[in-house]
Amino acid sequence: MNIKTNHLMRNDKSLMIACDQGLEHGPTDFNLKNVDPNYILDIALEGRYNAVILQSGISEKYYHEAYRDVPLVVKLNGKTNLGHGCPVSKQICSVDRAMKIGAAAVGYTVYPGSETEADGFAEFGKIVEQAHDYGIPAILWSYPRGQAIRNDLTTEVLSHAARIGLELGADFVKLKYNQDIEAYKWVVKNAGRARVLTAGGSKVDSHDFVKSAEGIMKTGATGIAVGRNIWQSAKPFALTHALREIIFRNKKASEVLPYLDNEKK
Ligand code: FBP
């Protein structure tokens, strides 16, 4: 089945902003400014992001009419890091509810290699079916984890994570990035027609993040679904501008690094 994904891209590339970390990591990721979901949504709107990724509760209370130009991805499962055991992340929002909230796509995380792998695969299978019945894409966060996964950033593990996205019917598969451009081409190949989005990870220097984005776009990935590196940045608009030029206009990091000094707001 060919599900339309163009509304989440521009020229076949995509820059999404994620803010589901409040559930996953807790308030430790936030400060007085970015703890307000409107702050993230304003960046998404003014930065012309291809999508904003939120949990259902935040979507219902904050994604109002003014933000409708930014497509909404409703994350359907989530967990905290308060426990130390095996990751268990069950579905907490239905596709029906996501549609009522205004979802343009739905998202779901699986933890391949964990004890909950089978449950996650089964739950995501149903989500793909329901999302595709509505004609919207399903995005899979494929994050190998658990006692058996010693290193989740090896090319072998990442390419398996990518392949899982394709095998399970994901339209986009969101993966961690290991900074190895040549090796990551194999990761992207394994995702086939499931488009690869890379996660941003914890906050790094913005110059390094821009250089890393240049590398990501050389691997064949469709784009980046970034959270903390944008909304924890002191200059989110300048960084967004630099990333847009790399992702959509094929510019080099060296050309856009000077943009980082020019915050619009
Ligand atoms: P970041 O760009 O902030 O890393 O966000 C990407 C993301 O996939 C979020 O959607 C999610 O909340 C978080 O990472 C989960 O990361 P982890 O499971 O590694 O804590």
Image (cartoon, grey):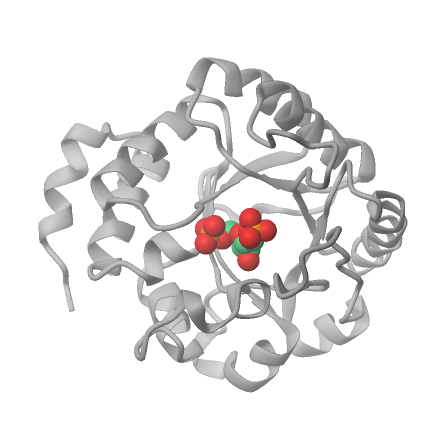
Q: Residue furthest top?
A: 182
Q: Is residue 195 shown left or right of residue 246? A: right
Q: Quadrant of the C terminus?
A: bottom left
Q: Residue furthest bottom?
A: 61
Q: Residue at x 77, y 36 (%)?
A: 113
Residue 56: give x, y in percent of width and height.
65, 74
Q: Is residue 209 shown left or right of residue 109? A: left
Residue 211: give x, y in percent of width and height.
27, 32
Residue 204 found in image quarter: top left
Residue toward you, 72 or 88: 88
Residue toward you, 248 or 84: 84
Residue 118: give x, y in percent of width and height.
89, 44
Q: Residue at x 65, y 63 (%)?
A: 75
Q: Is residue 54 shown left or right of residue 262? A: right
Residue 170 found in image quarter: top right
Eyeballing the image, is 124 above or below 176? below
Eyeballing the image, is 141 above or below 130? above
Residue 153: give x, y in percent of width and height.
55, 29
